[in-house]
Image: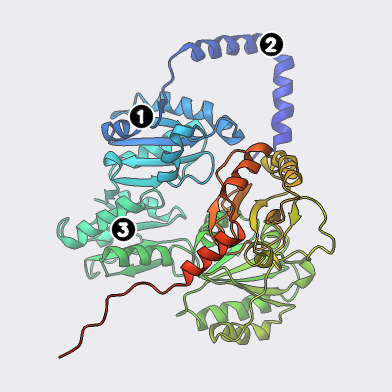
Amino acid sequence: MAISKVWISLLLALAVVLSAPAARAEEAAAAEEAAAPEAVLTLHADNFDDAIAQHPFILVEFYAPWCGHCKSLAPEYEKAAQLLSKHDPAIVLAKVDANDEKNKPLAGKYEVQGFPTLKIFRNGGKSIQEYKGPREAEGIVEYLKKQVGPASKEIKAPEDATYLEDGKIHIVGVFTEFSGPEFTNFLEVAEKLRSDYDFGHTVHANHLPRGDAAVERPVVRLFKPFDELVVDSKDFDVSALEKFIDASSTPKVVIFDKNPDNHPYLLKFFQSNAPKAMLFLNFSTGPFESFKSAYYGAVEEFSGKDVKFLIGDIESSQGAFQYFGLKVDQAPLILIQDGDSKKFLKEHVEAGQIVAWLKDYFDGKLTPFRKSEPIPEANNEPVKVVVADNVHDVVFKSGKNVLIEFYAPWCGHCKKLAPILDEAAATLQSEEDVVIAKMDATENDVPGEFDVQGYPTLYFVTPSGKKVSYEGGRTADEIVDYIRKNKETAGQAAAATEKAAEPAATEPLKDEL
C-alpha cells in the first residue's frame, strides 16, 4: 500500500524523537559508507568511449548537479552499484555530468533531453536502450539482473510458463527448432525490445496457457491482459514483428482513469506518434454506458485506420485538459491529434454523433483548432508577450531579429531567467530591428518550427528566416552581446532572402538523339 509523503514526514519526525541512539548508529554507518570508494563510475568525454568498449553491459546516468531528481536518485544509484558489483558477472553503473561543457557533446550524441536520463549500453555501444526500470536501489538491482540474462528464455515445461498469466504482456516464439532465419529474427527483436517486454521461446506449444500442440509453427504468440488475451503472428520480418508487438500491446481503447494498471498503456499511448482519438466524459454519470458502447463500435468500424483510441474520465484527466487547452464545461467532447500535432475538436458531442464526426475527420472535412491565449491588447513591456495566434506574425513576418523564450509558469529556471530577459530587452529597446519575446508553452500550442522539449527553451530567428536554438550565456550582457553579433541588418536580410529564392543550379539538358 502506498504511503503519502505527509505520513512519511510524520514517521520520520517520530523516529528522530524516539530513537536518537539508533540515529547516531546510522550516522556512523553513513560516515563509514561515505568514506568508501564510489561504486558508480564517473565518466566524461575523455574516458567515455573506452568505458563503453570495456564493459559489455553498462548503465549510464546523464545528470546535472542542480537537478533535484538527480540528487534524489544519487544514493539509490550508488547503493545499487555496490550491490551489483558483487553480481557474477559484475553489472556496472556509471554517471556523466551532462551539464559540464566538455560533456555536452555526449549528451547531444545520445539525445539527452532531460535529467536524469539513464541508458543501457550493450556490446560496446552497438545496442543502446532507454532504462525504463525503478528508481530505488532494490528495484534497479532486480531490473538490471533481468537485463543481463538472455533476451529470451526457453520454456521447457508447463511450470516454466506460469508467469505468462501474471497480467502483463509477454511474447513467446514457438518453433520446430532453435535455428533458422525466423528464430534469428525473433532473438534480434527480443534483444532490441527486452527493456519493454519479457520474451520466451519453446518447441512445445502445449506448454503455454491456452496452448495447442497442433499449432502451426513457427509462430509468435503475444499474451496480454486485455482485448482478445492472445494474438498470433507468422510474419518474422524484423520490422513486421516490431509493428505487430507495438500494435498488439496496447488496448484497442486505452482507459484514462485512476487505475494504476492502466498507466503503462497511457504512457505508451501519449508517446506514440500515431494520430490519437480521445473521448472525454464523466464516467460516473448515466450516459456513460451509451457513450462507451457507441465509441467502442466506432473503434471497430475504423479499425483499419492508422489511429489510436482513448476514453477518459474528466475527473482523472485534468492534466490532459490543461495540455490540450480544454475546459470541463466542453465535455462530453471528442478530440483528435494527428501526426502533425494538428488538433480537431467536437465539444458537447452526443453518442450518436461520434461515428459521423470521425468519418468527417478521415475524409478530411474537419478544420483544426489551436490552443491560444488572447492576443494582448497592450504589449508595452520590454519583453513582448507572444501567443499561438500571433507567433508567426511576430517571429517570422515582422522583419526583425527575434529572441523568443518558451517557458512554463511553474518552472524555476524560467523564473530566474525572467528578470535577466527584462534587463536585456530594456538594453535593446532603442534598437528597432530587435525583439525579445516570450510564450507560455503551457497555455499555447508551440509552432511546429520549434522543438521544445523542456523549459526554458530559447530560439533566435532573423528577418531572413534563419532559426537557431539559442545556446549562449544566461546573463543580460551575454544575451545582448549574442543578439548584436548575430542579428541581420535590413540589407543582409534582403540578400539572404534573395539568395534563398534563387533556383538551384542545374546541369544544361543534353539534346536527345
Q: Mark 1 points at which residue?
A: 46
In the rendered structure, which disc, 3 or 1, sits on the residue that comes first in sequence?
1
Q: Mark 3 points at which residue?
A: 172
* SS assignment at label 3: strand
Mark 1: few/some/many CA within 10 Å (<14, 14-19, 20+): few
CA separation in Å, label 2 and label 1: 46 Å
Furthest toward the bottom, the residue is: 513
CA separation in Å, label 3 and label 1: 42 Å
Q: Can you give x and y, in whole percent of width and height, for residue 352 in the image?
A: 67, 86
Residue 130 horizontal side relative to residue 447, left or right: left
**Callout 3, which amino acid?**
Val
In the rendered structure, which disc, 2 or 1, sits on the residue that comes first in sequence?
2
Location of the C terminus (image quadrant): bottom left
Q: Is residue 431 above or below residue 206?
A: above
Res. 475 visible in picture: no
Residue at point 59% right, 34% down?
A: 67
Camera-nearest residue between 23 and 129? 129
Q: Nearer the viewer, mark 3 or mark 1?
A: 1
Q: Nearer the viewer, mark 2 or mark 1?
A: 1
**Callout 1, which amino acid?**
Asp
Q: Name the residue under label 2.
A: 20
Q: Is residue 411 above or below residue 31?
A: below
